[in-house]
Image: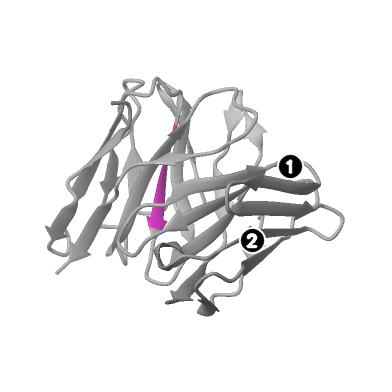
Amino acid sequence: DGGITQSPKYLFRKEGQNVTLSCEQNLNHDAMYWYRQDPGQGLRLIYYSQIVNDFQKGDIAEGYSVSREKKESFPLTVTSAQKNPTAFYLCASNAELADTGELFFGEGSRLTVL
Amino acid sequence: QKEVEQNSGPLSVPEGAIASLNCTYSDRGSQSFFWYRQYSGKSPELIMSIYSNGDKEDGRFTAQLNKASQYVSLLIRDSQPSDSATYLCAVVNGYSGGGADGLTFGKGTHLIIQP
């Protein structure tokens, strides 16, 4: 079945460590997105990529990095520079040139900093 | 920066009644609007999209859009306990490079359907 796979589902990190969250999709979508959700909050855009080897910062990119070397993959690295990394991270995609903009989400990765 | 406002709730509705969820947005030029449902601990799932003024119906769900008032609503008829969730309103940020620049989400309304 087509979909978006995020891993790991749960991750614990010590302060000062970098961690990479995986996002893979087999929907043949060109555009991919990373969002962060904090308890009782909406989703906030971290980074997005509309095409391989290109990506743009979202509203809260500081302390995060991404790469887009393959169409199927859009990993997110949470660096030690991110002050409050504990959150629910959601990866999403949509088809390029879609005049709708609707997003399809993976199941999410929950990161806890100890 | 676009803003999307929702009443956080909780909104409590008896089973079988109509649940009405509301959303306002700041950018008058916004064109595409979405309602997502999110169960606790899960990822959002798209339930409705609307692009033109007026009503759009899909089963028990009706989305309503009024661009002049910058207002989007979602009606859920014959509410069921399984409808209890957080409902997120979202607006497209814009389009560049041939694709969408993502969505701006409201904080969501927590809906509780009382059996």
Which region shows up in magenta? A32-36
Rendering coords of residue B13 (x, y %): 54, 77
Q: Is residue A9 or residue A68 the one in the foreground?
A: A9
First in residue order: circle 2 vs circle 1 = 1
Classify A16 as above or below A33. Answer: below
Rendering coords of residue B114 (x, y %): 45, 78
Q: Is residue B77 magenta?
A: no
Rendering coords of residue A3 (x, y %): 32, 31
The residue drawn where x is 30% and y is 42% is A76
Classify B3 as above or below A5. Answer: below
In the rendered structure, find residue B75 and report the number of the disc placed on it: 2
Mark 2 is surrounded, within 10 Å at the Cα level, by few (under 14), some (14 to 19) or many (20 or more) other residues, namely: some
Inspect the image, locate mark 1, and give the three-letter code of the amino acid beneath it: Gln
Q: Which residue is mark 1?
A: B31
The chain letter for the residue carrying disc 2 is B
Q: Quadrant of the C terminus of chain B?
A: bottom left
Q: Residue furthest right?
A: B68
Q: Magenta: predominant secondary structure element?
A: strand
Q: Is residue B75 left or right of residue B16?
A: right
Inspect the image, locate mark 2, and give the three-letter code of the amino acid beneath it: Leu
Mark 1 is surrounded, within 10 Å at the Cα level, by few (under 14), some (14 to 19) or many (20 or more) other residues, namely: some
The residue drawn where x is 17% and y is 55% is A10
Classify A103 as above or below B66. Answer: above
Q: Is residue A33 magenta?
A: yes
Q: Depth-wise, is mark 2 or mark 1 nearer the camera?
A: 2
Distance (Cα) linking label 2 and label 1: 20 Å
